[in-house]
Image: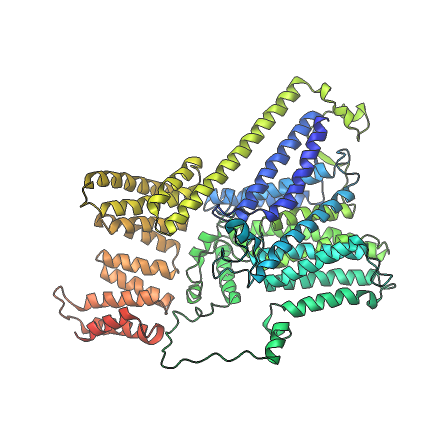
Amino acid sequence: MGLVKICNRVIKFSFYAVFLLIPLAIAGDTSELFELNKMWLAFCLGVIIGAAWIIKSIAKKEFRVQKTPLDIPILLFFLSQFLSTLFSWDHHISFWGYYSRFNGGLLSTMLYIFFYYAFVSNILSKDSGIFKTPTEAVKKFLNLNIITGVIVSLWGIPSHFSLDPTCFVFRGNLDVSCWAADFQPRVRIFSTLGQPDWLAAYLCVLLPIAIALFLENANLKEKFKFNRTAIFYFVASVLFYTALLYTRSRSAMIAIGTSLAILFFTYFYIKRKEFKIINFVGPLLVALLVTFYIGLPFSFLSRFSYSEVMNKINPPPAPKTQTNVEKPAPQHTGELGGTDSGKIRLLVWEGALEAWKNNPIFGTGVETFAFAYYKYKSPEHNLTSEWNFLYNKAHNEFLNYMATTGTIGIAAYLFMIGRFLYLPAKRLLNSIKKKEQENILLPVSLIAGYITILITNFFGFSVVIVNIFLFLMPVFVFVLENMINYDKGLFLFRNKDNASKVPANSESRYNRDEYSPSQWMGTIITIVIGFYFLFTLVSYWNADKAYAYGNNLDRVGMYQEAYPYLHNAVLKRGDEPVFKDEMAINNAVLAAQLLSQNNTQNATDSATTASALVKEAIETSNSLVSSYPKNFVFWKTRIRIFYTLAQVDSQFLPSALETIRKAAELAPNDASIIYNLGVIEGQSGNIDQAIVALEKAVKLKPDYKDAHYALGLFYNQKAVDKNGNVVNRDFLNKAIERMKFILTHINSSDTGALDALKTLEKK
């Protein structure tokens, strides 16, 4: 077998793996179970495809990139991402992507663009011999995606009934016990995609394609006579729709409703002369029954679902009431049921717009939304149930691009999308006008699926497989609509003698006996470099596993056990600041524990070890905040480091105060940071500054119990002298008011406020 043929097969099966394995990739021992593993697999497959393409080009003595209708939009989009990375608040994150996801960073964008050109230049190349025709290639890949979607659906649907295959793989139990109480697939399934909305976005892309393939293969001129192929596509469509309903994703239902309207309108229009409603009774009945049984994720339609109808027919017994039990007041308004997600999303969007207004040209940098949002967060967000969450995405892909890549980035992104939608839509409309209506349903379904990505991205953000669809679905449409001129290509280098030796579609012109020593040397070097990149990716992946284990141990207070894992992670990947950040706080906690044990027999050894740990923690933190001065997460860790050490050695308190003042500049409307600023100001003896900060904290978040309590304590300190005698009755009254406010408006049974109030009222 010739070298070119081997490379073609490697490229073909690697692209098979892209669509088959990436949606299924999960691992239980990494810091993020789903997206990290999918992204890393995509990187590995990209390296393999790239190496095979280079070796193939060396063998052919030419490197050719196929020209496509989207070349200029894609180039402009890449340049916008590159410039945003160049002027980013955090170059590391902008290049790699936000840690644990990585999707969206400059490197992942480069990968998706590479997939686009690798696919169109190799899989669809007329002389590759991989497939007979480009159309055949596209249909094979679409069928592979349908098969993968069936697997994903069959994996996810049982979890609604407490039979989750993921838990069986991770824990050996076919149940849902491996998931936290607030992340239950019984409520909203997520299968191997990791989150209900991500699964829904993936299924939204596939459902119109499956329906189109069903309609193309079904013989609807005769009642209910479907061949096996049509039956498969019909079953796949039912599975996709069922799983989609079980995700309970409202944005996905809007998206799929829009896409199916486009698809069916097109179908009914081109089949209007031969259309018979009787032929659709079966499929429509199945769709209605599935919808009725599961229900739609909209409250105004839920009353028409099976469960609601049964509740009306046979109402459940009323719960028994308990008397003489006082219900505690909620911590804040939304916490009993959580603030409506729509309200929270609007607040996050408001913050994204503020970030864009203040950084209008290149934004804050690719994937830096987490830090941008802290800077421009709306004070009103403190009043929601997710007031203390970290948002690393704007939950709107378009606003996310605006905030992080500026006007240049969002304009390039919209131009790329708009250009794709315009070109095939114009061609399809012309075909319909000319009554050339054969074989247009499948490209229409692809466009409809592409539109679902835009809709779900408007209410959320893309993940790895969805971004791959975003870049490769245009290629599928261009092929089906014959919009690619395969004779046009960009040659990075070219051997003009190749074309004159033998016919273009013959691989015999690349006989291995004709390869020169330099070609073999180039091939060997490419293989070695490819293996180096793969080894590096695997090493980084193993480093993440060590970090994940150490991080989990830290979370449960097992800092000593976590120490070797975190240092191992840093040793394996010393350029990842997230690993260093976690290692620094681990060192600080261990040092504090050792310093608090200075009365033991090994006090000297403990002090020496603690000193080394303190030095490493502070030096590591110094390096991180110096290299990434706007990375708010690292400043929060630095606060923890100095505050933890200050509990055993007060000399670290000034450093903690200096750090939190800087953090307050980066997050001026974050109630938690302002509260902690007040506490540390007070502990540093700056009572007046503490009161100012805490008054701001309760203004930002009126139901912040801890801030009211601390403010009351500092009011009391201002009210009494060093002997405890009241010297300022006004401040004492203010202290009493804070405790009464807690008991009246936040929690009437709060023991801390009750005890403090009794003490204050005695003065």
Q: Is residue 560 left or right of residue 5?
A: left
Indicate the position of residue 677 as horizontal and vertical percent values.
31, 57
- 97 shown above or below 11: below
Name the side, left or right, on which 78 lies relative to 56.
Answer: left
Image: 558 above or below 683: above
Residue 656 image offset from top left, x and y in percent: 29, 51
Query: How did the renderer colour the structure?
Result: rainbow
In the foreground, 180 or 118: 180
Q: Quadrant of residue 37?
A: top right
Quarter of the view holding residue 297: bottom right
Looking at the figure, which quarter contains the N terminus?
top right
Question: From where the camera sits, is residue 627 visible?
Answer: no
- Residue at the far left: name it: 723
Task: Identify which residue is drawn at 64% across, 49% down.
Answer: 470
Q: Which residue is drawn at the image coordinates 57% and 42% (left, top)?
A: 41
- State the residue lying farthest toward the bottom: 323
Closer to the camera, 60 or 367?
60
Residue under the image location 64 percent in, 55 percent down? 154
Quick check: can you spot residue 329? yes
State left or right for residue 737 relative to residue 459.
left
Position in image of residue 283 (x %, y %): 76, 64
Q: Residue at x 23, y 41 (%)?
A: 606
Q: Is residue 196 left or right of residue 384?
A: right
